[in-house]
Image (cartoon, helix red, strand yellow):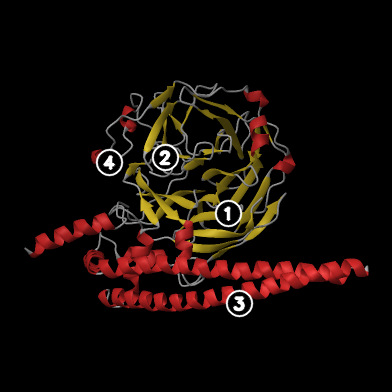
Amino acid sequence: MRKLTKSLMLTTVTALMISIPAVSFSTNVSADQVMPTVPAADNQDQQNFWVHSWDEGKNPIPVTTTSNALSDRNDQLFRAIDSSTPNMTAVWGNYRRVKKITKPNYIKAIDSVNTDKVNFKTKWFLPTGFNVSPQEHGNYQGAIMANNSIYIVESMGTGANQGAIIRLKMDALQAMGLDDTNHQSLLIQVFNYFNPFTDRGRDNSLKFAKFINDSKKPREASNQTQKQLQKVQKAVNKAQSAINKSLVKYQKADQKVKAAKKKSAKKVLKAKRNVLFKNYKAVKRMQNGRIKVLNRQLNHLNQQFNKHQDKINKIGQNNPIFNQYYQISKSVSVSPLMNIGHGQTLTYNPSNDHIYLAQDDQLGEVNNDFYNQVTELDAQSLKPVHQYRFRLINNQGVNLALHTLTFDKAGNAYFGVRSGRNGIKDVYTLYTGNFTNKKISFRPVTGMIKWPASYNQYVTYNAINDRIYLVSNDMIVSIPAKEVRNDTIKPQDVHYVSFKSGREFESIAFDNKGYGYLLALWRSELLRSDRPMN
């Protein structure tokens, strides 16, 4: 009977909490490393997006297939853009690991070209996982920002090709105080405490389920009181605003009196000022009386709110993490387990408010029977709405696997590879194109970017400055999107910033002010730039 009760309670916890999968530390493969290819008949098995059949929708996902999406150019047209490169040391492995999470971490620039240096500071340390899978091990592969949220891919590791998309609602988490300098590790504390894949976590989850049931009435009462508090506070603000507006009118009239030079004009203005002064006194008297009544209501409601919170804390045996987890659970959503491939292609298309993810289970040059598969998802529901299947075969007959992808405001697509054409080495080649319901198309950019760094980790777009960003370990590069599309990149267009952190850089995302959020491993963390990026 005891076992049955626990089983039922764990089911309740799963429904209440943001559970799903994750792995133990394994080798992390970058986007440009070539993996052995296995001949496959056009990899139809990759059509399955969800790992578990019960997560699939009733209707099949529409699919667009293009036999060869690449319109290639003659090799002789390709050239390296003659820009300067920053001082740096390429980081190929043996990454520096962060052990302490008691204070923020810093990643500081050591050099830059054509732009200012930018530094990063820890915003949040990320947990080992968001309780997605027993395999999770703190391996996050990509991040984007949209809809006042940050979306992160949690990967179960190289070889597993599985993972989930985590959505963190920024405003809700900030309202909880996760922006405070002493709260960078709160997500780790909370999700480790309730990890359903450990005995301790399961026990804490059972206690949490009991807390949710037992605290239902005081939580509902607390929420209702909070709404009343907000309503009364709004009325106080409105009354104070009426006083301020009346005062401003009087002050403006008084200034006009002082500025007037003619006696006749001054006399008329004084009369108007005196009327406004009397009106201000009347408004102040009336609204102050109203504010006094409203403040008494606020006092009473605050007392009620505190009583409800005391009951909630008593039920939770004064364990603050229960309440923290309950609040965070409303701010974080997790998709079911997906076949994500490597996971570094998570991208957002501003033109249709959709997310795209390439299920890149093979890397580098692939067999000519291989079709890239990109799945388009609704940004709100995280459910797939369309799939795109295509090959990228160049003039040499080489089929390229897609491992990076981004979109600009107009819906133009971009990806890149850390390799050159025309015999040129240590460069990066960009491609631009489009996804439509009828076909997929890409063409290479003949101006290649000098590349002093290691792996091709990520490609993304900053809507604030309309630039494409390329990410490698300890290096961030950006180029104007327009110059990429027009194939007119000039040396001064290419901005480099280099670092000496020894960390693995996975991706960078941008908020609506242009600040960058760098996703770095190990341990996993999001770091915010100290200024809008260029």
| Classed neighbour count for the residue bearing mark 3: other residues with Cα under 10 Å, few (<14), some (14–19), many (≥20) | few
Residue beneath disc 2: 378
- First of labels 2, 4 by sequence position: 4
* Label 1 residue SS: strand
Question: Residue at horizontal 39%, vertical 34%?
Answer: 385
In the image shown, does 355 or 230 lie closer to the viewer? 230
- Give the foreground label among 2 and 4: 2
- Residue type at the position of mark 1: Gly
Residue beneath disc 1: 516
Q: CA distance from mark 1 to mark 3?
A: 49 Å
In the image shown, does 267 or 424 lie closer to the viewer? 267
Residue beneath disc 3: 285
The residue at the far right in this view is 262
Q: CA distance from mark 2 to mark 4?
A: 15 Å
Quarter of the image where one finds residue 81: top right
Q: CA distance from mark 1 to mark 4?
A: 33 Å
- First of labels 1, 3 by sequence position: 3
Image spot of residue 350 (x, y percent): 53, 40
Question: Residue at horizontal 92%, vertical 70%?
Answer: 263
Image spot of residue 26 (x, y percent): 36, 52
Question: Residue at horizontal 68%, vertical 71%?
Answer: 279
| Classed neighbour count for the residue bearing mark 4: other residues with Cα under 10 Å, few (<14), some (14–19), many (≥20) | some
> Are discs 2 and 4 less than 8 Å apart at CB?
no
Quarter of the image where one finds residue 529: bottom right
